[in-house]
Amino acid sequence: MPRSSLVDQYQKLLSAPPPKGMSTPLLCRIVAYEVQSALYGGLPLRTRNKLQAIASDLAVAPAGPSLRSGSRLVRDWNGITHIVDVVKGGYRYRGRVYRSLSAIAREITGARWSGPRFFGLKGAS
């Protein structure tokens, strides 16, 4: 089926245009799934509920590393020791509370760093 027909089918089945940049093979798979779902029924209720539970857990999960309030991060940078305390609602560095470790890493280095990576909380992947 040509891409233009797949796009038309996608819009018909999902009542929305496909996201920009979606590949033709993925578009084909989504259309095929939606057609089969309409004909034979979708996922079982138990599976849908499980997926919904997983999605809602991810929605409320913290974006950054999970550190308890009272934890302390120490990083030496250019011969200076930098200390960050984890506080409720963020991170305290030099008397100021920041919402993210990345903002503190930027303050220290003057460059954009991943805060968790800068403080050694994430591997160099």
Image: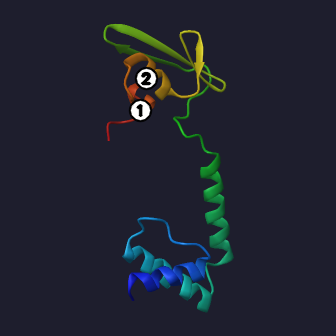
Outermost top residue: 80
Label 2: few (<14), some (14–19) or many (≥20) C-alpha neighbours in 10 Å? many
Q: Earlier in the sequence, mark 2 or mark 1?
A: 2
The residue type indicated by label 1 comes to Ser
- What is the quadrant of residue 67 in the picture? top right
Relative to 2, say whether 117 is above or below: above
- What is the quadrant of residue 78 in the picture? top left
Q: Nearer the viewer, residue 66 or 27?
A: 27
Relative to 48, say whether 107 is above or below: above
For the C terminus, give its image quadrant: top left
Task: State the SS at label 1.
Answer: loop
Q: Nearer the viewer, residue 86 or 105?
A: 105
Q: Position of residue 27 (x, y in %)?
A: 44, 76
- Residue drawn at point x = 63 percent, y = 86 percent: 41
The residue type indicated by label 2 comes to Ala
**Res. 114 mark:** 1
**Res. 105 mark:** 2
- Residue drawn at point x = 48 percent, y = 79 percent: 7
- Cα separation, mark 2 vs mark 1, equals 7 Å
Left or right of residue 103, residue 112 in this image: left
Q: Are marks 2 and 1 in contact (CB under 8 Å)?
A: yes
Outermost front residue: 4
**Res. 28 mark:** none
Q: Position of residue 30 (x, y in %)?
A: 49, 77
Q: Nearer the viewer, residue 111 or 62?
A: 111
- Residue drawn at point x = 56 percent, y = 21 percent: 71
Q: Nearer the viewer, residue 56 or 109?
A: 109
